Image: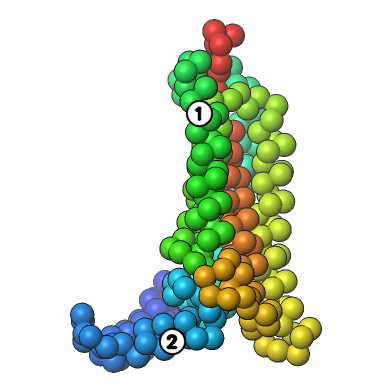
Amino acid sequence: MSRTARLMLFFLALGPFVLACCWAIAGLPRFSGPEHRYGALAADQSLSASKINNAVTAVTFDIRGFDTLAEEFILFAAITGILLLLRMKREEKQENDLDRARKGRIMFKTSGAVVFLGRHLMIIVALVGLSIALHATVSPGGGFQGGVIIASVMLIFIFVNSLHGAAEMLTRIFEIVESIGMLGYLACGVCGWFAGASFLENILPKADRGELLSGGLVPLINFSVLLAVAGGFCVLLLEFVKQELIHIRGDGQ
């Protein structure tokens, strides 16, 4: 296809798209208005049907669970694309760690105080991340937020430990964790079909309001998102380490 034909096709598609955007924007409620139909319906559903105190969690994992699944696949595809690019670049340049260090790559000599504080801080950060993720039905938080916090534990681990010989093994482990999270989300949706309901329909019994299992299927979906997000970002951090970062402890030998 010629450049002129591509431009014509682009502008032909752009016109309807712009008109649709203008129509959608014109139909939005007044900015900072007191009422919003979707907000009122979402709040009512989260309080009555889902029995979830956190309306954001109810919307994300129950009312709009299919949209959240699509967002998970977008994150999965983005991380996969980055990994492919980084690994292709690394295969093109077969350099060992010391060669790269001599060429001006980043080198770290970690002090004993940083190692001591970092190893204790990892436990605190991991517990905070788990708490934020697992209490999504009763307080602000969720698998996305908790997953990112838990992934930061890997960042601390990178700075306080030598990864020579362990980076590949850790990458494989967290790739499996990410895959389990993605498959877990899909399994929660498919369970609805086996129960004679629709995909991602909340078929599990719901506990009383204020309890961790008050959302029925929502806690399982939330935990799957936690695994996918934490595993994906840990794999990404490890891949950046293997690509650019030389971690040398002790006297740098």
Q: Position of residue 230 (x, y in %)?
A: 58, 51
How far apart in space, not on screen, are marks 2 and 1 (Cα)?
Answer: 44 Å
Q: Which residue type carries mark 2? A: Asp
* Residue 220 found in image quarter: bottom right
Q: Which residue corresponds to the image point at 51% horizontal and 39% vertical from the top-left?
A: 124
Residue where numbered disc 1 is placed: 118
Q: Is residue 62 left or right of residue 189?
A: left
- On screen, 170 above or below 145? above
Please tell me which of labels 2 and 1 falls first in the chain.
Answer: 2
Q: Which residue type carries mark 1? A: Gly
Q: Secondary structure at mark 2?
A: helix
From the viewer's perspective, is the residue at label 2 or at label 1 nearer?
2
Q: Secondary structure at mark 1?
A: helix
- Does the image show residue 194? yes
Q: Which residue corresponds to the image point at 56% horizontal and 51% vertical from the top-left?
A: 130
| Residue at the extreme right of the image, as rendered | 194
- Does the image show residue 80? no
Residue where numbered disc 2 is placed: 44
Q: Decide which of 84, 223 is in the foreground and name it.
A: 223
Q: Position of residue 138 (x, y in %)?
A: 49, 67
Q: Decide which of 183, 211 is in the foreground and name it.
A: 211
